[in-house]
């Protein structure tokens, strides 16, 4: 596991993999085994970003879901996209939560998310309205 820079399991997967009691303990176990950054998806609560510098829940963006197919994949893609553009892990999680939220607004895994600019506008609208 020492070769893993970013790991994106959901909380249940991480707990099962590590034998931990909860997601925070699972992230700590993964770190002890060499995972540099763990980003645990914790459903409607958002995600837990864990590394040597932080262990922080980044809240999900609340919207009514039409179809959750592909939400986790969209989350990971959004996270990696902005991480490669220089965003820090916690801000990348905020962006990724926005991508996942947008992705569930239409049927299918790829129908809702069309471009980086679309996601940025979507997140700006959420931040402006607080919803």
Image: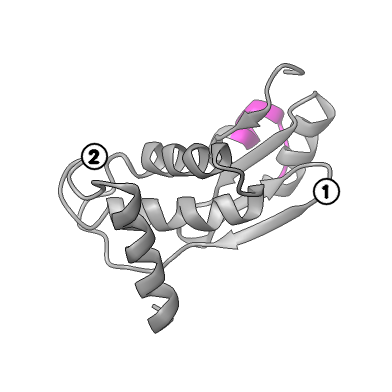
Q: Is residue 44 above or below residue 84?
A: below
**Looking at the rendered structure, which numbered label has been put on residue 63?**
none
Q: Pinpoint residue 27: horizontal percent, then vertical percent.
A: 72, 40
Q: Position of residue 122 (x, y in %)?
A: 33, 64
Please state if 125 lies on the left or on the right of 17 as rendered: left
Residue 92 x, y percent position in the rendering: 56, 50
- Image quadrant occupied by the N terminus: top right
- Residue 20 magenta-highlighted: yes
- Specify the segment rendered in magenta: 14-22
In the rendered image, the vertical position of residue 80 relative to residue 115, given as above or below: above
Depth check: 28 or 88 in front? 88
Q: Is residue 81 magenta?
A: no
The answer to whether one can see residue 80 in this image is yes
x 44%, y 75%: residue: 127
| Secondary structure at numbered mark 1 | loop
Q: How crowded is the residue under tag 1: few (<14 C-alpha within 10 Å), some, or many (20+)?
A: few
Residue 99 pos. (x, y %): 38, 52
Q: Residue at x 48, y 62 (%)?
A: 60
Q: CA distance from mark 2 to mark 1?
A: 33 Å
Q: Which color mode does the image show? A: one colour
SS at badge 2: loop
Going from the N terminus, do you reach mark 2 or mark 1 first?
A: 1
- Mark nearer the viewer, 2 or 1: 1
Q: Which residue is mark 2?
A: 109
Number of residues whose C-alpha sits closer than 10 Å to that of mark 2, classed few (under 14), some (14–19) or many (20 or more): some
Residue 7, picture quadrant? top right
* 40 lies left or right of 18: left
Q: Which residue is mark 1?
A: 53
- State the residue at coordinates (72%, 43%): 21
Task: State the count of labels.
Answer: 2
């Amino acid at each position: 596991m020492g070769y893993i820079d970013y790991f994106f399991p959901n909380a249940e997967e991480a707990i099962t993999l590590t034998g931990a009691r909860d997601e925070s303990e699972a992230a700590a176990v993964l770190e002890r085994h060499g995972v540099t950054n763990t980003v645990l998806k914790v459903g409607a609560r958002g995600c837990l970003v864990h590394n040597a510098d932080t262990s922080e829940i980044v809240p999900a963006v609340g919207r009514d879901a039409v179809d959750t197919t592909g939400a986790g994949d969209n989350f990971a893609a959004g996270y990696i996209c902005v991480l490669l553009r220089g965003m820090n892990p916690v801000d990348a999680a905020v962006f990724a939560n926005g991508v996942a939220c947008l992705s569930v607004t239409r049927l299918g895994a790829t129908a809702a998310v069309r471009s980086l600019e679309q996601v940025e506008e979507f997140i700006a609208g959420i931040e402006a309205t607080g919803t």
